[in-house]
Image (cartoon, rainbow, N blue to C red):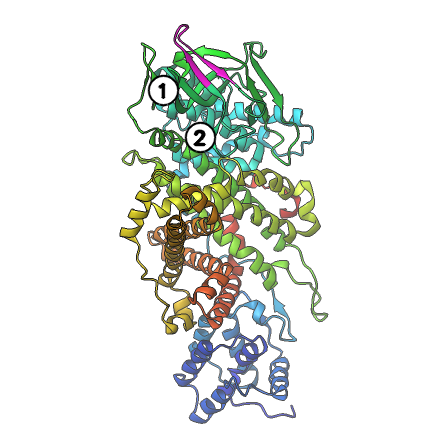
Amino acid sequence: MEKKIYASGILQYIPFFYVIWSDDLVSVSEINVVEKAIATDPTLTAEEKKQLKSWLDVNRPPSNATFKHWKQIVSHSNIKLIEDETYPLAFFSQKVVCSYYDTCPFNDHLRDIEINLGIQPNHYNHLFDIEVQHKATSDFYNAPEIDAILKGKHAEAIDGFRAVLKDPVFKWDIHRDKEVFRKKVLEQVRSLSKKGYGAMAYPKGYGGTGDMEGYAAIFEHLMYVDGSLAIKFGVQFGLFGGSIQKLGTKKHHDNYLGKAGTAELLGCFAMTETGHGSNVRGIKTTATYDKNSDSIVIHTPGKNDNKEYIGNALHSKMASVFAQLIVDGKNEGVHAILVPLRDENHTLLPGITVEDNGYKLGLNGVDNGKIWFDQVRVPRENLLDKYGSITNNGHYHSDIKNAHKRFFTMLGTLVGGRICVARAGLGGAKMALTVAVKHALKRRQFNDSIKVQEDLLMDYPTHQLRLIPLVASAYVYHITLDKMMAVYCDESQPDKRIVETKVAGLKSVITWYANSTIQECREACGGKGYLTENRIADLKGDVDIFTTFEGDNNVLLQLAAKGVLSNFKAEFNSAGFSSVLKLLGTQLSDKLTTINPVYSNKVDPEHLYNPKFHKHAFDYRTRRLTYTLAMRIRNYIKKGIPSYQAFLKVQTHLLALGKAYSIELAYRTFTDFTEGIADTKNRALFQKLGTLYALHEIRKDASWYLEQGYLNGTKSKAIRQRTERLSTELRPHIAVLVDGFGIPDHCLSAPIVK
């Protein structure tokens, strides 16, 4: 070789320097890592240390001639870089030295550089003119172990349910005739009810096991079969049966709950109206008590006051109808009444009109319809009267005297359905991610004209950044929803308004996440993702509606924000607003001073990966948005603007607060969970997933943090780089991570995953 070969001490660092400078990995903190390794490396002479440090001057980077010389040295060594070795670049450097010198021990200082800088294959496999041995995935982690962590205490129920889904009745197929599709889904619902899953959340005396948490855990799995099955199942057993269970009393349970759980009595949940979607308190359907006949008269007063988008409307024999209850001429607010719709021959009863909603963007296996009531009489006993009843002498009675509190208490009992909607959305996202990731681990595209084999999609940094943070988010949201359902089911906390506020925000951010994730997965699969057979197309249509049913996300985020403002205690209406301001005055003060510039400038990995930084960043955003929102509202009120109008002026601010609060809640819930993982290896993996989630979310809102002076440009850039770096570090384990979702193989019917 014409040019001089470096001494072995310097030579072992050449591959590292080549990667660092070629791939622009160098930042001030990273130079410090390399300098520290060089300074403490006993294999180097003083002269060698001086030479190596001279190549770390960011103001005088190595020349192009030096680069070419480094590349020539590596190429002439004829050494292959093996990606699946424990420390690929460190072992590679050792072998390069071995090709030129007799003595070439492994250098732990190089290993430390590789670890601390997070150097991964995509940083170097395009740099060397040598063969790089590819391995699609690492087996360092074990998917069943990860799945077991996610299943938690519900493992037995989930494993049993997964086995049930092997039944051919649950085999996924393409359906484009809604009548055929609906018939198939109804058959699936009946099949599950016969095995006891419909009544799973009901008390033992009514065919169930009282396991609402387990019900939510299996509910997500229904999305792996079909979105229509998940929703049909949820309407029948969760909404219709759940309203009887949660809002009714023993007489209702005895007469209807067991039959609802076995699907002997098919029912629907008639709350939403054409003219009043999310405004449940403002619905127009009336339920007027007639003392003379001791009956309740259900009536649709106007053209747009009919019930709308009611799932199970075409198959049901009974409906839980939400209406304004009028007793003794007084409107007592919204209550639920059981109203028969059809007779034993499935013929509509007098006064009942049902109209098919027709074809929809998705969920065409669910029979959504419109319902009108024309002076329909039902017995007084049909009022679901847990929170409000009509006495034998014809008067209204409720132990909850405050009408607003009574309304929120009734709706709060149905929060479980909102959690299940979020779980269903998450299930759709997991399915799409699994399809997209498995496709990316098989599909190859492009090469550098030197290698014969093209590169895997998953080895491209852009593909990693598109999908891997979304996988991390799925883990965070899974743990969070598990926790929310546990809190909701905790009978020692009867006031459900606190968890209702939390779930309102989480349902919003998670269903939005699900939709954007499915879209990203569709694009990541190219034309294959557009084919119906690969499932993502149907997932797009099915999950889309989740953002607006069980509460429009924009409305729910405002509910969450108002809960933050009032510390979950005050009711938000014009009469109660002054009390909210007093509460804010005692809890908030302008302590949100400018962030210390030193903090804003910190970019070292130890800081950026520290949960304390993430929690501080999320907490700061929530507190800052809370304080500035409260001050804006107060200033409007001082100017004489009515409180309702004041809230309209700050709607976008409310949405920002609701989202910030929900992201913080999810992250804190996840980090609390990870601390309890016994196995250190898996705990470290979950902690890395949490770190990626946090940095990804901070990065998405970087403009706000920059505006507030919480970050400066350098730190914002460092967060972006670390997000990319973490995605690359998790790349070897991505197959195990999606397998860790536990989606049964018999549900993975998409041809591109085979």
Indicate the quadrant containing the N terminus: top left, top right, bottom left or bottom right.
bottom right
Q: Quadrant of residue 459?
A: bottom right
The amino acid beneath tag 2 is Arg
Residue 543 spot, x, y in % from top left: 57, 40
Q: State the extent of the magenta-drawn residues as a range.
A: 287-299
Q: What main secondary structure does the magenta stretch of the protein show?
A: strand
Residue 691 spot, x, y in % from top left: 43, 60
Q: CA distance from mark 1 to mark 2?
A: 18 Å
Q: Quadrant of residue 155?
A: top left
The residue carrying mark 2 is: 281
Is the residue under label 2 in contact with that under label 1 (CB below 8 Å)?
A: no
Reply yes or no: does residue 481 show up in magenta. Answer: no
Q: Is residue 575 left or right of residue 654?
A: left
Q: Which mark is residue 175?
A: none
In the rendered image, the residue lying farthest to the top is 292
Q: Is residue 373 above or below residue 752?
A: above
Q: Please, what secondary structure does the residue beneath circle 2 have? A: helix
Residue 396 spot, x, y in % from top left: 33, 17
Q: Is residue 662 above or below residue 385?
A: below
The residue carrying mark 1 is: 385
